[in-house]
Amino acid sequence: MTKANFRILLIVSFFLGYFGAFYDFIFANELLEKINIYSEQITPAWSDEKNLLIGGFYIILMLVDFGVFVGLFFFYNFARILYIPILVVGYIASLFLGVLSVTSISLVLCSIATLLAGIVLYALFTEPVKSYFTKRAEETSSD
């Protein structure tokens, strides 16, 4: 895989992941909105502090994820190592979102992004992509 191909894979994976996650907020669906309102009525209410804490955690996670994306794009070795824990923390954190109703388009976009994340993960630790990061690390250490 060339550097250009890897970068395209990264961009598509990153874009589909976030577009899929926010699709239902961007393109509102009346039926989905009614289902979400009903699910909020039947589930225990969270306190404002808990909502603020969870929201803050997700904002920090998104910023770190963006930093890892930029690091991967420019082949910084720290990003290659941080990709795994960020991926794991993101999936574990999604378990705490509670009951969610999403459209099939959002589900498909997120599923494709997950598949692409697996391909990125594989590429990061196999040749030739792995060598792009080690060459970068050798270049910066020799300066």
Image (cartoon, helix red, strand yellow):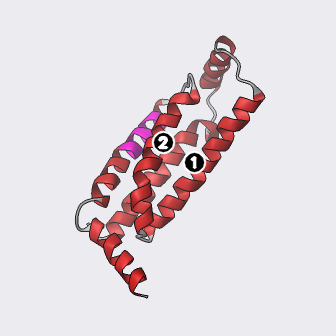
Residue 120 % position (x, y):
34, 55
Q: Mark 2 touching mark 1, by CB under 8 A? A: yes
Q: Main secondary structure of the magenta part?
A: helix
What residue lies at 65% left-to-right and 36% top-to-bottom? 54
Residue 91 shows in the view: yes
Q: Compared with residue 58, is residue 3 higher up or lower down, i.e. above or below?
A: below
Residue 102 shows in the view: no
Q: As shown in the figure, which amino acid type bears the numbered disc 1?
A: Leu
Q: As shown in the figure, which amino acid type bears the numbered disc 2?
A: Val
What residue lies at 65% left-to-right and 24% top-to-bottom? 33
Q: Which residues are magenta?
A: 105-114
Please state which of residues 56 and 16 is positioned toward the viewer in this rendering: 56
Q: Which mark is residue 116?
A: none
Residue 73 % position (x, y):
44, 67
Which element carries disc 2, helix, strand or loop?
helix
Q: Earlier in the sequence, mark 2 or mark 1?
A: 1
Mark-to-mark CA distance, 2 and 1: 8 Å
- Residue designated by label 1: 61
- At label 2, counting other C-alpha atoms closer than 10 Å, the crowd grade (few under 14, some 14-19, many 20 or more) is few
Q: Which mark is residue 89?
A: 2
Q: Is residue 39 magenta?
A: no
